[in-house]
Image: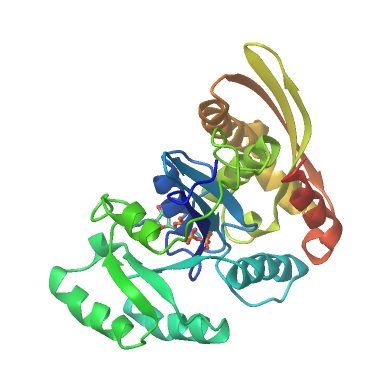
Amino acid sequence: MESKNFKSGFVAILGRANVGKSTLLNFLLGEKISIVSSKPQTTRYTITGILNMEDAQIVLLDTPGLHNPKKQMNRIMMAQTQSVISDNNLVVYVTDVDKNNFEKDKNYLKQNKISNAILLINKVDLIKKEELLPLIEKYNSLGVFDEIIPISLKKLQNLENIVNIILKYLPCGPQYYPDDIISPDSEKFIVSEMIREKVFNLTHEEIPYSVAVTIDYFQEFDKLSKIGATIIVEKSSQKSILVGKNGDMIKKIGIAARKDIEKFLNKKIYLELFVKVVDNWTKDSDIVQDVISSKIT
Ligand SMILES: Nc1nc2c(ncn2[C@@H]2O[C@H](COP(=O)(O)OP(=O)(O)OP(=O)(O)O)[C@@H](O)[C@H]2O)c(=O)[nH]1
Ligand SMILES: [Mg+2]
């Protein structure tokens, strides 16, 4: 469908790690496709979500928060974000209310030459009302933002107009994707992410950052899908923690992941999880590339 009244465009959701970018994507879609955790650097690959309306299609791109590219994995995460920065119709920049972050945001915007954006100041549930105005003024002084909107994705505050504000900045254009899909990323990839989220939420220290998830089989039947996935770690000590005493941890991960996957696929699933050690995989790009290619297959 293409008419002169139809609006569409690519919206880059950018910002430091842990500010709520993926929470925003899920909120806007009304469905969880992007994983969320209280730990920074949760999102590793750009996640695309499509918001379809009668006279518009918004393609939302949730990106990894930028950080130091020490490991191969991190370099790939940064490259994912860079490509979105260079190619979009609108930047929605997300920050949160911790006052130490202003300088970091300033650097992020400068380094990436972002001179035009909408700013969402998230997590306003964590500060007093009187602290908000000075913060808005500070960000306003940068001269980058057309609009500054304080929000709380947790308490669902001030979110009513976000979609209309985004639409204001999008051009007339074609429908880029069919109107019956929520994401062009494969179900297989989103399922692997849901498993990775449970590892992020249930394990600590370096383990979340040492894990990749690959899907070994995905068999669909009428009332049930059978899914087998491997959680890859870097060291055998990490494998022992992930499996847990008597397999307790892997069981917990499986139960939590199954709930989310069933909701997402809207059917019963049988989930089989394996844990495998691949020495130093985060420094090597093969597994990372495997996961990225699973996004489209
Ligand atoms: N208090 C509060 N917490 C929030 C709010 N929105 C998101 N969070 C929490 O902030 C944490 C980070 O959220 P994410 O959506 O994963 O953040 P992100 O920006 O995608 O993080 P990366 O993928 O690591 O870059 C999670 O624990 C969320 O539940 C909010 O409005 N208030
Ligand atoms: Mg994220």
Residue 34 visible within the image: no
**Residue at the left extreme, as displayed:** 130
Image x and y of residue 151, in percent? 28, 60
In the image, residue 230 above or below residue 211: above
Left or right: where 157 falls relative to 226: left
Give the x, y percent position of residue 59: 53, 52
- Considering only vertical position in the picture, is 133 above or below 238? below
Q: Nearer the viewer, residue 221 or 117?
A: 117
Q: Left or right: where does residue 168 sit relative to residue 104?
A: left
Displayed quadrant of residue 189: top right
Give the camera-side residue of 24 and 216.
24
Q: Position of residue 202 (x, y in %)?
A: 54, 46
Q: Quadrant of the N terminus?
A: top right
Left or right of 12, for residue 128: left
Residue 238 visible? The answer is yes
Quadrant (top left, top right, bottom left, bottom right) of the C terminus: top right
The residue sitting at 44% across, 43% down in the picture is 29
| Residue 263, image x, y percentages | 50, 28
